[in-house]
Image: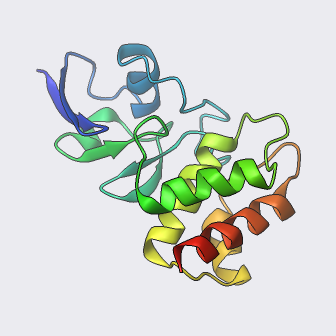
Amino acid sequence: MPIMLSVNGRSRELDVDAETPLLWVLREDLGLTGTKYGCGIAQCGACTVHVDGEPMRSCSVPVSAVAGRKVTTIEGVSSRAAKAVQKAWVELDVVQCGYCQSGQIMSATALLEKKPRPTDTDIDHAMAGNLCRCATYHRIRAAIHAAAATLA
C-alpha cells in the first residue's frame, strides 16, 4: 500500500515498506541527501528533520509514522528563522567537518521558531541531542544567539 508524505511542501506517494526508517526514504527514494546518517539509534541528531514543525530523528521513525504529516528537510527549510540560522552559521564560521551541521541547523531553527530569544539554558536543552564530533558547541551557541538577535 502506498504511503503519502508531504516533503518540503510537495506531496509524494511512495511504494516503500511501512517500517523503513524515514531517513532512508528521504535519502534513497527521494534523493534528499542533506539529512545525514550518524548513529542509527536517534542519539546523535545528524538525521534531524522537522515533522509538523517539530524536530525529529529520522533514523528511528518508520515512514508510516509520518504518513500524511508535513516533513521538512534541510533542503526545504526556508523560514525566517532558518535563514537567520544559516546566515549566522556562515558568518561565525561554525562548521568544521560539517557532517552534523544539517541536523544542528534543523534543531536550532526549530528552537528559534518557538523561542526567538533563547537563553543559554534553552539552547543547551534544545541542542542536547545533537552531537558535534569537532566540538564546535561554543560556535553553535554563538550562532544561535546571533540568529536570534537578527530576528528581534
Query: Residue 72 sits in which quadrant?
Result: top left
Q: Colour mode?
A: rainbow
In the rendering, at what x and y percent does residue 89 appear?
A: 70, 52
In the rendering, at what x and y percent does residue 18 appear?
A: 26, 27
Residue closer to the observer: 89 or 59: 89
Residue closer to the observer: 53 or 63: 53
Residue at image location 68% in from the left, 43% down from the top: 101
Determine whether 92 is above or below 22 in the image: below
Left or right for 109, reference 134: left
Q: Which residue reaches farthest left? A: 1
In the rendering, at what x and y percent does residue 142 appear?
A: 78, 68
Look at the image and tell me in which quarter the N terminus lies.
top left
Residue at image location 75% in from the left, 53% down from the top: 91
Callout count:
0
Left or right for 18, reference 131: left
Residue at image location 67% in from the left, 34% down from the top: 38
Left or right for 78, reference 128: left
Residue at image location 56% in from the left, 39% down from the top: 47
In the rendering, at what x and y percent does residue 53 appear?
A: 35, 58
